[in-house]
Image: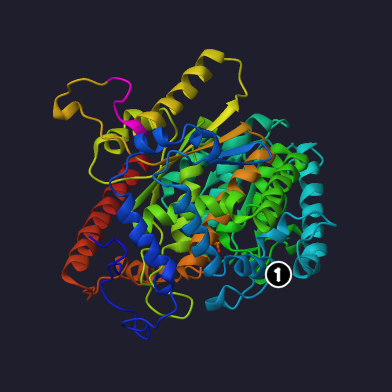
Amino acid sequence: MNRSAKPFLDQDAPGSTIGRRPGGPVDLPVWRELCAHRDELAATSLTELFAADPRRGTVMSAEYDGLVLDYSKNTVTEHTLDLLVRLATERGLRAGIDAMIAGDHINTTEDRAVLHTALRAPVAGALSPAGAQVSPAVHEVLDRMSDFADRVRAGRWCGATGRPIRTVVNIGIGGSDLGPAMAYRALSELADAGIEARFVSNIDGHDITRTLGDLDPETTLFVVSSKTFTTVETLTNARTARQWLLDRLDDPDAVAKHFVAVSTNAEQVAAFGIDPANMFEFWDWVGGRYSLWSAIGLSLMIAVGPGQFRELLAGAHGMDSHFRSAPFEQNLPVLLGLLGIWHRNFRGAQAYAVLPYDQRLSRLPAYLQQLDMESNGKSVDRDGDRVAVDTAPIIWGEPGTNGQHAFFQMLHQGTTPVPCDFIGVLEPAHDLREHHDLLMANLFAQTRALAFGAADDPGDRPPHRWFPGNRSTNTILLPRLTARTLGRLVALYEHKVFVQGWIWGVNSFDQWGVELGKTLATRIHDELRSDRQPGFDSSTDALIMRYRNARESNTAARTSAAQLEER
Ligand code: F6P
């Protein structure tokens, strides 16, 4: 089977070039060489590759400031890597990295620069003139955030009744939720001011109901986070939170003390009723899923303090510098991206698992899902032509060892290859040494079993106990999980996604694929409340009718229950 065949598409986008113009990655001779090399290597196992070179386990690794990527347990040779590096070079990756950092409008469909790297550069450390140009505004907001966070943390910013803030509730969704939620969970040991952060994202009323259930309005601060400030979920949750507050404090002026906003849209923030003085700004050159480093991180900063937040930025900035300057052969994001391309485009992997062996990183897979799949889940390239290669895989994962008792069966014996990243932390933040030894033993055991099958326990096995091995994994090790190493890790993945998107030729920074569902939801929302015949397809119409009937009887039941109670 030729795994470099065109990807499946139901229908070509109108205007896209059916049959493709030449100029994509598959048109490069190196792509064909990679296909031929894949076929040559098809019968070679990881066991054989390791036997052929006893140094493989140490040679096939790269390190940046203590963050180690061991990629030796991938079905690759030095020649594979040479070819992949050639692919990156011939696809102009170096120029692509420079264009992003220089602030070129590489987000072509929205005509925007992509400058999240400028959010984490120190005052005098901009990576480009464009970075230097935005730096004063970036640091002005960072300083305002720090000042605000310090006041909240020290009890100098109090609620309307004069009590200090004990809980900060971030209301946002997607990139305005996942970044701070993931990082807060990772770093909550550092939350040293007695302020808890909570995150509400879902339009499902259970989310906000549960979040607010045990909170004291007098000590609760809401951070309404939305780049556009038009996102229905966020605005609906924010209105519900405001009503919750007003119902309990009975003081319209309380909103000013309990609500701040993070947005690019000052007009909509004012229209919502939040004083623009209490708004923290960011800019259209920050993509939602790349916005953790902007004011979107405010709730995290309040919990862990401005010093730790700046450590996070410094960690990411270090990875930016490494990405920009390290040779591709030693460049962690480039290597991670190229290995992913090898599996996705040449070895038929449709999915990719991220398996943090650290409970603190439990939201990392969800965060990376948005980062990767919203960035590179595209079928049309930057010129509007249909892509000729498979793009983003399905990203999923759970922390180890939990995943081992759930879906690892499929990883070991299933019919679909799933390359994985195993992420481990050498030194835990607790004293339970036995736990940590067992955790790390499991991580190492899993990657060994996936690579070599039952090599440690040979002998006759019935087919259902057979482990084929030869399943590729990366192992990423951090010395400790700190704000700085977390920043490094997240920036590593951001740039990995960039590498892949650039090579595939897609715009990694737009997300038009989410628009249709939003528009339809608005139309269907209207239909749920009307008594017209809906007029969609027969399935959607029938589902709407079922919901309407249930809604009517629920409302009737609630009304009579309320009447009974009144009597
Ligand atoms: O619907 C997708 C999306 O636009 C994401 O890209 C974004 O992170 C999220 O919604 C939230 O958007 P906003 O920050 O504008 O509320």
User: Residue 193 appears in which quarter of the rendering?
Assistant: top right
Label 1 Cα crowd, 10 Å radius (few <14 / some 14-19 / many 20+): many
Q: Which part of the image, by quadrant, shows the N terminus? A: bottom left
Q: Which part of the image, by quadrant, shows the C terminus? A: top left
Q: Is residue 202 visible?
A: no
> Is residue 18 positioned above or below 26 on the image?
below
The x and y percentages for residue 4 are 32, 64
The x and y percentages for residue 301 are 70, 44
98 within the magenta span = no
| Residue occupying image coordinates x 31% and y 38% | 411
Farthest residue, direction bottom: 15
The scheme the figure's colours follow is rainbow
- Which of 548 and 480 lies nearest the eye of the viewer? 480
Please, what is the dominant secondary structure of the magenta stretch? loop
The x and y percentages for residue 112 are 62, 74
Q: SS for tag 1?
A: loop
| Residue occupying image coordinates x 34% and y 40% | 471
90 lies left or right of 44: right
161 lies left or right of 289: right
Farthest residue, direction right: 124
- Which of 145 and 450 lies nearest the eye of the viewer? 450
Mark count: 1
The stretch of residues the image draws in magenta is: 451-457
Farthest residue, direction left: 462
- Which of 101 and 288 lies nearest the eye of the viewer? 101
- Residue tagged by mark 1? 102
> Is residue 40 positioned above or below 477 on the image?
below
| Residue type beneath disc 1 | Ala
